[in-house]
Amino acid sequence: MKTACDTIFDYHQRTKHHLGRYAAGPDFLDWDSQPDPFRTFDGSARVELPLLGEVSQPLYAALYQPGAVAAQALTLSSIAALFELSFGLSAWKQYDNNRWALRCNPSSGNLHPTEAYLVVPECDGLSAGVHHYLSRDHVLEQRCHFAPPLSIFPSDSFLVGLSSISVRESWKYGERAFRYCQHDAGHAIAALRYAAATLGWQVRLLDSWSDAEIGTILGVDREADFGSAERESPDLMLLVTISSQHDAAVGFEANSLVESVRRGEWHGKANVLSPEKPIVWPVIEQVSQAGQKPRTQLLSWHAPGLPAPLDSFCKLSATELIKQRRSAQKFDGSTAISSRAFYRILDTTLPRAGLAPWDAIDWEPRMHLFIFVHRVEGLVPGLYIFLRNGHIKEQMRAELSAEFEWLPVSGCPGHFALFLLLRADLKKAARTLSCHQNIASDSAFSLGMLAEYQASLSSGPWVYRQLFWEAGMLGQVLYLEAEAANVRGTGIGCYFDDEVHDLLGLKTRAFQSLYHFTVGGAVTDARLQTLAAYEHLQHRG
């Protein structure tokens, strides 16, 4: 009998791109059926959130210095800042007569399948309950009002829940959309953690909670409230705490909260995002069902003691850096970065206790980086590998091509597991493997994220989603660190999976490539106008 893990494995194989064919997707983009990027709940009471404006913010570099940012009080303004810097609009773009919004959390194709919810006890004008965040208007829509027992939430804490609307991605990407929804959830985890760090707050994924519990708390399982509207799949729940409460999540069970929302007063009907229904891809529902997470034990992995990350030379405030993040569309093909900047970028991908964003999750790194170095000063061009946990080296070495050199990189930080595998000009290979996209070859370096695939899924089919979350978190780190290094980055979701594995000489399916990313000197189209993110908010409400 076919198991849930079999379904996951089959989906992953089925949705790989190949040199001779691409994964199943639409033959053309039907613009009439593109889903609305903004979900609203008609009939819900709205709370307008204040904007950050000119409020003084910590430097981006301070986010990597434990204790450097004092914890802000839990107020409506601080909650508003958290959502503005994680899920809010960062800019509007205009090209000729076309206009679209950008957000602080990146998204595959800027399609934004992720929806964010606040679950909060009564706080500074906010009623206790479940609130949906509408980024377009920077408002909270109250979906549920409940009277929670005082013991439900740890002190000075609240929850942020995430869900996905897969049709937003499948409209463009077809069957591969489930992968991209999970990438975006990972970007969102890291975006929230960085935003919390600007307030001196902590974030932790409640990885023991089940999808069913999360779906009930967020109200996405309420048939009557959705009707013919596109459904949302529950993704995850995050605990936000104002002070450093390392054990705040221990003993925090979903049961009481589930009962509170079941007894609560619910309001609002979800809007229909696409009156002209897009193509349905049944395999997305199949893999979504197979990857549902039950209640599990709380994980207890702890990050190793590492030296502090290399200092950042960035002098921007965290707010400036977060809001200026963009996905590069084109690189100049000539900009190099220093080895110092390169090492700083890699260093921030390593988990450390108490530092964003990796302290938000409680599992050992399962993703490693293979890097096409094109233009990094002091490093010879070629293929490198960066292991994010050192004990995987022998297994990885046995799995990859026997022709690789595995030379330690002279001059890199002593705690790095960074190795030169192959000396070569790989710009053409990087471009070809990334679906013939020049951004992979014109950058300073391009990388792929190699997951400990089979071993991870042995813990349960839902871990497939967590692998992509980790890849998305890596992507958010790389985005911000590229900006901090005065260059730009962009995620690459389109690559030829098995051809990448052939280059690496992978012998089995023990490791799989889940996401690519590239960093370099960006070229800006002068015809593309950037507009103020919230200029339209004078009309909100």
Image (tube, rainbow, N blue to C red):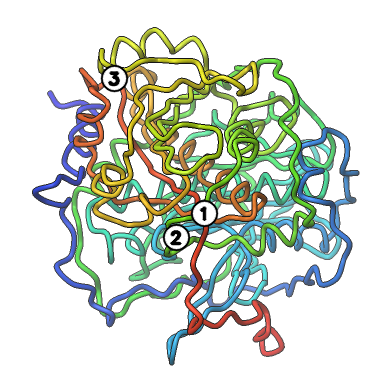
Q: CA distance from mark 2 to mark 3?
A: 33 Å
| Residue 30 locus on image (x, y percent) | 23, 77
Asked if residue 442 can be seen in this view, the reply is yes
**Amino acid type, label 1:** Thr
Location of residue 356 (image quadrant): top right
**Amino acid type, label 3:** Ala
Q: Residue at x 60, y 60 (%)?
A: 325
Location of residue 244 (image quadrant): top right
Among numbered discs 2 and 3, the one appearing first in the sequence: 2
Look at mark 1 in the image and give the residue it sits on: 335
Instruction: Identify the image quadrant of the C terminus.
Output: bottom right
Q: CA distance from mark 1 to mark 3?
A: 36 Å
For mark 2, does the 10 Å Cα neighbourhood hold few (<14), some (14 to 19), or many (20 or more) residues? many
Among numbered discs 1 and 3, the one appearing first in the sequence: 1
Q: Residue at x 31, y 44 (%)?
A: 430
Secondary structure at badge 2 equals loop
Q: Residue at x 46, y 51 (%)?
A: 184
**Mark 1 or 3: the one toward you:** 1
| Residue 40 locus on image (x, y percent) | 52, 73
Question: Which sits in the foreground, 381 or 324?
Answer: 381
Q: CA distance from mark 1 to mark 2?
A: 8 Å
**Mark 2 or 3: the one toward you:** 2
* Mark sitting on residue 331: 2
